[in-house]
Image (cartoon, rainbow, N blue to C red):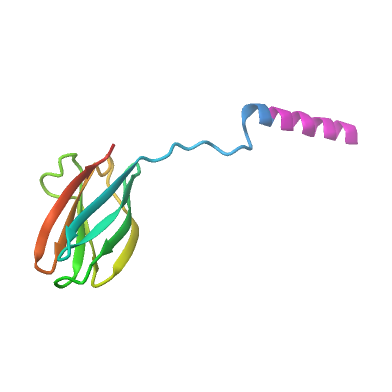
Amino acid sequence: MNRLKLGIALAFAALMASLGAGTSPVYAAYPTTPFGITGGEDFGWTNGGFTWYNRSVGVQGEVCDEGGVGSTTVWFYFYLNRQGAGSHYSQEPRTETNACRPFNWSEPGPAGGILSVRVWLCTTGGCGYSQLYTRP
């Protein structure tokens, strides 16, 4: 009886191995886009990257203020179109004063996904630099 159980177990293991069961599935890497804006002493700078998921966008990087006038804020405006035009879907700011501040979050999106992000670099005196980044 033990030989029968062992034979069945080996046959089952061979069948599962031939079907690929028990192995980890292969996942495609999500596309990424680096970003960076430098505004000089009064504006500081920001850099990082976007990870474009099915609906949402992962945002990772830092904002740095070099001790100019006030603080440095980076604004992220998320759009459902590639042109970054019209009303934005959502927005998120990150601010720092006289230092660097890391950030890392995922901005949720609707069906169809977020297709572009406009990044603005601002100080307490206003915004001066922007760049549009689109989903690859």
Please give the name of the residue rendered at 30% of the width and 47% of the height, measured from the top-left corner.
34
Please give the name of the residue rendered at 21% of the width and 72% of the height, measured from the top-left corner.
67
Pinpoint residue 10: horizontal percent, then vertical percent. Answer: 78, 31
Quadrant (top left/top right/bottom left/bottom right) for the C terminus: top left
Quadrant (top left/top right/bottom left/bottom right) for the N terminus: top right
Answer with the quarter of the image where residue 43 lies.
Answer: bottom left
Instruction: Please provide the residue range marked out in magenta.
Output: 1-15
Q: Nearer the viewer, residue 46 or 118?
A: 46
Please give the name of the residue rendered at 17% of the width and 55% of the height, measured from the top-left corner.
120
User: Is 104 left or right of 69, judged from the image as shown?
Assistant: right
Answer with the quarter of the image where residue 125 lies.
Answer: bottom left
User: Is 4 left or right of 43, judged from the image as shown?
Assistant: right
Report if residue 4 lies within the magenta region.
Answer: yes
Pinpoint residue 102: horizontal percent, then vertical percent. Answer: 33, 63
Report if residue 66 lies within the magenta region.
Answer: no
Name the outermost residue toward the front.
41
User: Is 55 left or right of 14, judged from the image as shown?
Assistant: left
Prevailing secondary structure class for the magenta stretch in the rendered image: helix
Pinpoint residue 87: horizontal percent, then vertical percent. Answer: 12, 49
